[in-house]
Amino acid sequence: MGDEELWKKGGMEEKRCGCWVVLKKGLCRTSSSSKSNRASGDALPRTSLVCDAVTETRYLNASNRELSASHEAQLSTEEADPLTSEKKAPCGLLQFTFQELKIATGNFRPDSILGEGGFGFVFKGWIQENGTAPAKPGTGITVAVKSLKQDALQGHREWVAEVNFLGQLHHPNLVKLIGYCIEDDQRLLVYEFMARGSLENHLFRRALPLPWSSRLKTALGAAKGLAFLHGAAEPVIYRDFKTSNILLDSDYNAKLSDFGLAKAGPQGDNTHVSTRVVGTFGYAAPEYVMTGHLTSKSDVYSFGVVLLEILTGRRSVDKKRPSGEQNLVAWARPYLGDKRRLYRLVDPRLELNYSIKGVQKVAHIAYYCLNRDPKTRPSMEEVVKGLMPLQDLNDFAIRSVRSHSSQQLRHNKRLDGNWTVSHVEKRNVSNRCHG
């Protein structure tokens, strides 16, 4: 049976393992361009990967527009990941029709929108438990349906990357890709539904602050997700680690989503991948932005930025703040290594409801993740080991303050009592003397 016949066949088995013959419009990267990229990348001196304070400041003070310009300028130098007409979609993924997803989301109703990005919209929908058929709202399985903008060439590349990576990578801290739809110019992805939305929403858009324990749980889960990617048999560099891409389930378990910019890591003796500069300003590692050299330590830097956001409750870039505080890394770096001033970084909305040792350790990890020399940054496996013990700490600052206040109160009462006894004794002595 030919590939095209297999694609059109309607049985469940065929729906679960569709093939990529329909993706002939996808871009294929030639092996020669890959080799030339590596050759040119390896020719750059080692020192080009380490930025000094002045260079870093220039990067931190750059604008979103400048990063976008760099992205566009280098866009044509990198093709999509290898994709041929013989390559099949990862088995286990369901192939949906556009009509099925249209019904599942209530005709893509505006009130079912969960989020929006450069790729398009994400809608809430429902499907049957055993198949691709749509279900009535509130029944079956709740899913998130990402719809790609039809006029986005780069979006198609990212769509392919998502299916490639999430179709093959499975881990408790990666969002589960259930299936996809490719029909005419329609490109959609179907994910498991994450009930509590993104970490970004909880840190910056909710009236109630995210509790310290939930922040630590989220940080650990996200770190485990990155560690899994970096430690895979074929390492993967996430390349767009940020709070909006960290989704939370009903129990605040964190899962990485949106693998559109993910990239296969260096192979063999290669130390890095030379690639166009993409990502989100404020999170991308300075040496990656300046050289296009991508390594797992680029993700580690981004994790350090997110860890700062979790600690401070501030965005990585916030133009509404005073000039010296608009870039989180630049503002926070002097405090991270100073134990006395460290607590000025803590999100004031927590109101002392945080672990003292936990804050110290989180700041310590963030400090090393943000090191200017990528080689001295820890691995994500080391970060996971550093974060795990923090989950059980209960030395909350508010208890320390209350204990100190109680001791001070008792001390003051004791002083007051001594003053009163002494005063009475002196008065009695005086009365006896004048009696």
Image: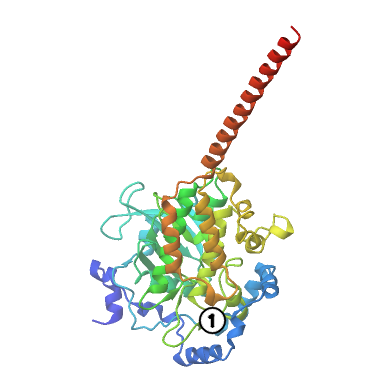
Screen quadrant of the N terminus: bottom left
Q: Nearer the viewer, residue 304 or 335?
A: 335
Determine the image quadrant of residue 128.
bottom left
Tell me what residue is drawn at x 36 percent, y 83 percent.
85
- Tell me the kind of residue under disc 1: Thr
Tell me what residue is drawn at x 35 percent, y 70 percent.
167
Q: Nearer the viewer, residue 415 or 66?
A: 415
List x then y, in percent, for residue 33: 50, 90
Q: Say whether residue 123 is visible.
A: no
Q: Nearer the viewer, residue 68 or 380?
A: 380
List x then y, in percent, for residue 305: 56, 63
Identify the residue at the far right of this view: 434
List x then y, in percent, for residue 59: 67, 72
Q: Say whether residue 286 is visible.
A: yes
Screen quadrant of the C terminus: top right
Determine the image quadrant of residue 208.
top right
Q: Which residue is mark 1?
A: 275
Colouring rule applied to residues: rainbow
